[in-house]
Image (cartoon, rainbow, N blue to C red):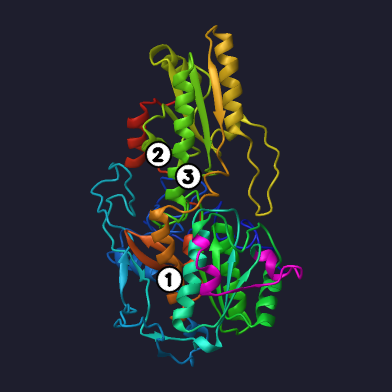
Amino acid sequence: MDVLISSTAIFTPLKNSVLVRPAPPGSLILKPRFPENSVGFHRGAAVRATAIDLSDPEWKLKYQRDFEERFSIPHITDAFPDAKAIPSTFCLKMRSPSYINNKDRVLLKVINYSSPASAGAVCIDPGCTWIEQWVQRAGPREKIYFRPEEVKAAIVTCGGLCPGLNDVIRHIVITLEIYGVKNVVGIPFGYRGFSDKNLPEIPLSRKVVQNIHLSGGSLLGVSRGGPTVMEIVDSMESRGINMLFVLGGNGTHAGANAIHNECIKRRMKVAVVGVPKTIDNDILHMDKTFGFDTAVEEAQRAINSAYIEAHSAYHGIGVVKLMGRSSGFIAMQASLASGQVDICLIPEVPFNLHGPDGVLKHLKYLIENKGSAVICVAEGAGQSFLENTNAKDASGNKVLGDIGVHIQQETKKYFKEVGVSADVKYIDPTYMIRAVRANASDGILCTVLGQNAVHGAFAGYSGITVGIINNHYAYLPIPEVIAYAKSVDPNSRMWHRCLTSTGQPDFL
């Protein structure tokens, strides 16, 4: 049966359920400390809950072996043992080649927590045993598995817009040309471009992409949803595509993984490499995803405007809604960076609007003592207060209610009821923060991600994605990255820093 490309349909490994291996007598099955729909022991590494027999003196070694097996990245030679490696064609003029050894690794977990009670602790066992967890380092290899003259590379951008898309496209194309690839195309408007005959592929070259990073958006266009996996691979086969670079979030990467598996099933020698793209910064294991820094920076404009409006009015209240469906990273970081936010509301931390400890009561306190207040709320926060329509978008994501408008209306209603005048202004910069050009920080990140995506494909890896981990670039198998969305840990130091900045109490 064909599977439709969507964030919920292709890859359903364990998002809402936990796979537990049969537990031997005396074993301990550890429950995750994070949201119920998460899977695994902790945010740092594990993807599925595994029964650990702590009475087994070799449990640590077995856990490490399991980790290494799960994070081993697929290679062309797994399906094609006779694939021949050739010397790399990646060579810069007047520069000596600099290659990465295949055995180089990046440490995934860098803090040795001494106690589960430590802020943000991520522990595998009750004693917080330190276990080294290594992942494959990204970069150019001395041997490659594709001849550049035989490569037809395709790039596709899926989902919504994000600052830096054009930067990544640009550097994928430039790096492919340095390897010697002459045939590079863009697939227009996401996965849809593989099946829509009215959307011809776009020839790409250094000349075409030279200045595209100077503007936001995507040269190739974006869309959600699309054809079946079978149709996509049929299209790739007929077009002769043997390298596919997929820029997108969890749902898009689920599609990329399904495409990779179908190519193996058909015995097609194709490298499928992802580049994580989500403005929400909710991809597992990554320090950050491209576009996030730019979004936080652009959000400062909205927060500052809300502050000026509130500060300049009598009993002024500014409400700013930022992106963040299931994770509040943008709202948290933007609030922390601005220093102008009094209340930050995110999906991971429940709150009440009404009641003696609710948001509105604290707003009244702020008005009485400060004269004004600014609220920053993530779009996915407080959805329980809104009507559930059960509607979904083309990617299978739940259509959210507008929590910003709800807070604005409830605030006006509350202050009218208590007999206190309040001037409430609402700002929604949702699409403004994602449509801008990438800033310098994201520009560098996009450059290196694009280059390393190409290096990974030529090295023969497929079904992988590239990201930055502890300030180093690494390759990860797609299933381990998309098991569930990363979210803000309410016990983390970063969230505590945000609370220190805002001075807000618990709203429960």
Within 10 angstroms of label 3, few (less than 14), some, or many (20 or more) residues?
Answer: few
**Disc 2 and disc 1 in contact, CB within 8 angstroms:** no
Question: Residue reaching furthest top?
Answer: 419
Q: Secondary structure at mark 3?
A: loop
Q: Mark 1 to mark 3: distance in Å?
A: 35 Å
Q: Nearer the viewer, residue 363 or 316?
A: 316
Residue occupied by mark 3: 35
Within 10 angstroms of label 2, few (less than 14), some, or many (20 or more) residues?
Answer: some
**Residue 323 screen position, x and y as percent:** 53, 42
Residue occupied by mark 1: 451
Give whichever of discs 1 and 3 has the lower sequence position.
3
Residue 192 in the magenta stretch? The answer is yes
Q: Secondary structure at mark 1?
A: helix
Q: Mark 2 to mark 1: distance in Å?
A: 35 Å
Residue 502 in the magenta stretch? The answer is no
Question: Identity of the amino acid at label 3?
Answer: Pro
Q: Is residue 327 above or below residue 383?
A: below
Residue occupied by mark 2: 490
- Identify the mark at residue 141; answer none if there is no mark: none
**In the image: residue 198, left or right of residue 427:** right
Residue 130 visible in this rendered orientation of the protein: yes
